[in-house]
Amino acid sequence: MNVSNVEITAGLGGFLVLFGLALVVWFLGRDLSRRLRRMRHREAQRQAESDHDEGADKQTPGTRLPEVQTPRSQTSHSQTSRKQADDPPTEADVRPPQE
């Protein structure tokens, strides 16, 4: 029931604000997409490097590296095993150091 025949709309100001918000959302989405793509690329590079390093650590059959003898007290737990950080600890990991 519009008695005075006056239309109340957002007008040019409302259009510009809505258009500005749409541009901001578009730019933020584009930036997010770029960041995720870079993150996936870096993770793939890191994974490829670790796979390459693991391949270099493996010995060819019939060859042996010279063994270096170190006293047990000077060897830390991180040097004795090449376990992943997320593996659960074993008895050797939680054993108190020997004096």
Image (spheres, rainbow, N blue to C red):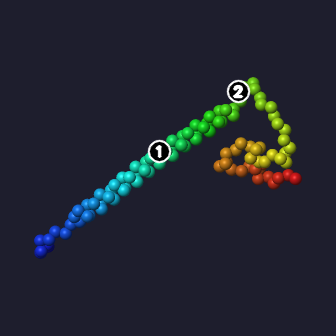
Task: Give the image quarter of residue 17.
Answer: bottom left
Residue 95's disc is: none
At label 2, which amino acid type do we have?
Answer: Thr
Q: Secondary structure at mark 2?
A: loop
| Residue type at the position of mark 1 | Arg
From the image, tell me which residue sits under label 2: 60
Vertical placement of residue 52 versus 16, above or below: above
Residue at the extreme bottom of the image, as rendered: 3
Q: Are marks 2 and 1 in contact (CB under 8 Å)?
A: no
Secondary structure found at label 1:
helix
Percent position (x, y) of residue 66? 80, 31
Residue found at x 77% / y 31%: 65
Spot the residue most to the top. Answer: 62
**Image quadrant containing the N terminus:** bottom left
Q: Residue visible at 85% across and 48% down?
A: 73
Whether residue 29 sits left or right of residue 8 in the image: it is right
- Left or right: residue 91 versus residue 55 is right
Task: Give the crowd class for mark 2: few <14, some 14-19, many >=20 residues within 10 Å.
Answer: few
| Mark 1 burial class by Cα count in 10 Å: few <14, some 14-19, many 20+ | few
Alpha-carbon span between mark 2 and mark 1: 37 Å
**Residue 21 appears at what percent x and percent y?**
33, 59
**Quarter of image, res 57:** top right
Tell me if residue 16 comes above or below residue 60 in the rendering.
below
Q: Is residue 6 left or right of residue 81?
A: left
Residue drawn at x 58%, y 37% is 48
In front: 92, or 6?
6
Q: Nearer the viewer, residue 79 or 24?
A: 24
Mark 2 and mark 1 lie on one chain; the one further toward the N terminus is 1
Question: Which residue in the protein does label 1 denote?
Answer: 37
With 74 as the anchor, is 50 left or right in this view? left
Q: Position of residue 28 (x, y in %)?
A: 40, 54
Q: Residue at x 65, y 33 (%)?
A: 55
